[in-house]
Image: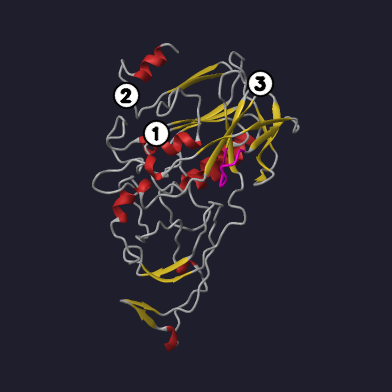
Amino acid sequence: SSTCPSNKEKYSETGDLASLPLLCDYPLKSQYLRYDSDYLPCNKRHCKTKKKKNKECTCSGRLRFHVINIRTDIKAVMFSGGYDSPVIVATSRSVPFRNPEQPLYGHISSPDSTGTSMRVTWVSGSDATQQVVYGGRKETVASTVDTFTPSRMCTSDADPSPAKDFGWHDPGFIHSAVMTGLRHSTSYAYGYGSDEVGWSSEIRFRTPPAAGESELNFLAFGDMGKAPLDRSDEHYIQQGSLNVTAAMISEVNSGMIDSVFHIGDISYATGFLVEWDFFLCQIFPMASVVPYMTAIGNHERDFPRSGSLYETTDSGGECGVAYESYFPMPTQGRDMPWYSIEQGPVHFTIISTEHDWTLDSPQVRGKSRD
């Protein structure tokens, strides 16, 4: 059957109450054929057919989708019966991406308070070591490689979580490397990749002021997520994120911003893991040129019996694994997503509201020595 009504619960348990197609395979994007102005009912008898209980009496239609490189083949599926009772009418052949190993969606973050180093993190379909080149291609540093599997996702005894089942998507391989020997408040060029899988374009970034410098300009916000650049319905759309992202990109491009701090509720992927790729693509124009520092939120971490402070299903079973893989911050270790960093005259203390923050907790004990 193409219809899986139980998937409605998998959407709603993450907090997404939108109407989405209850197909058995996770629909990355969906649109109504009526969005095509040339899509008209067809009165010819041979166009009128029935499939199961659904009448089909149309000739043709055309839709446009914005798709990014998610490393795995994609298909287009036409279905009737609406979102609640979809019946697949036609399926395209599988369409591969030209280079599923392409290094993509690079973003940078500060690993310490000196302003003399910068971490670059990107995604690729290849687990082979890649490089960051910088300083006029005079310096190179090899990447370390991370990934995660369904076994690391959280789930309940009664029903698999979205991240472990319906929403799972192979994340590929997450590469990370630290550029060193930099000067604070200085502009540099860098690129990442390899001769085997290809290279990113050259990107210019600026190191932030070192701790103790007299001035810092930064953006701080939370709860952003992502939204489609087409007319598609998707999981957990945050429509305002497009305007917010565009405004921040404009600020960053002005050259006046030293850092960005995204404080919790990052992508709203919430167990539908391919949405992380779309989020990384959306923030790329700013996150690749200034440090993009993050804090964990309920939609990245919370799941029952997973160690989170709150016993909700808000992460869709990700339980912090995807977040910490995509955004390695200067923390003390896995599932300890709190840290401190100084830039210019500002001391930032990043806490996790999703972990124990009582006076005797590891998080608060560590901060008392900050």
Q: Is residue 123 magenta?
A: yes
Disc ID at residue 184: 3
Q: Is residue 85 magenta?
A: no
| Dot placed on the residue nearer the N-terminal end, 1 or 3 | 3
**Residue at disc 1, secondary structure:** loop
**Residue at disc 3, secondary structure:** loop
Q: Amino acid at mark 3?
A: His
Label 1 sits on residue: 297
Q: Real-space Cα distance between discs 2 and 1?
A: 13 Å
Q: Real-space Cα distance between discs 1 and 3?
A: 30 Å
The image's colour scheme reads secondary structure
Q: Amino acid at mark 2?
A: Asp
| Magenta region, main secondary structure | loop
Q: Nearer the viewer, residue 46 or 96?
A: 96
Please give the range of residues in magenta. 122-129
Horizontal side of 35 relative to 212 (left or right) equals: left
Q: Give x and y (percent) for residue 126.
A: 57, 45
Quadrant in the picture for the C terminus:
top left
Q: Residues within 10 Å of mark 1 (few under 14, many from 20)?
A: many
- Image point (40%, 29%), residue name: 335
Q: Nearer the viewer, residue 158 or 6?
A: 158
Between tags 2 and 3, which lies in front?
2
Q: Residues within 10 Å of mark 3 (few under 14, many from 20)?
A: many
Horizontal side of 173 relative to 12 (left or right) equals: right
Label 2 sits on residue: 356
- Image point (59%, 39%), residue name: 106
Quadrant in the picture for the N terminus:
bottom left
Q: Give x and y (percent) for residue 150.
A: 39, 45
Q: Give x and y (percent) for residue 154.
A: 33, 40
- Image point (34%, 60%), residue name: 22
Q: Amino acid at mark 1?
A: Gly
| Dot placed on the residue nearer the N-terminal end, 2 or 3 | 3
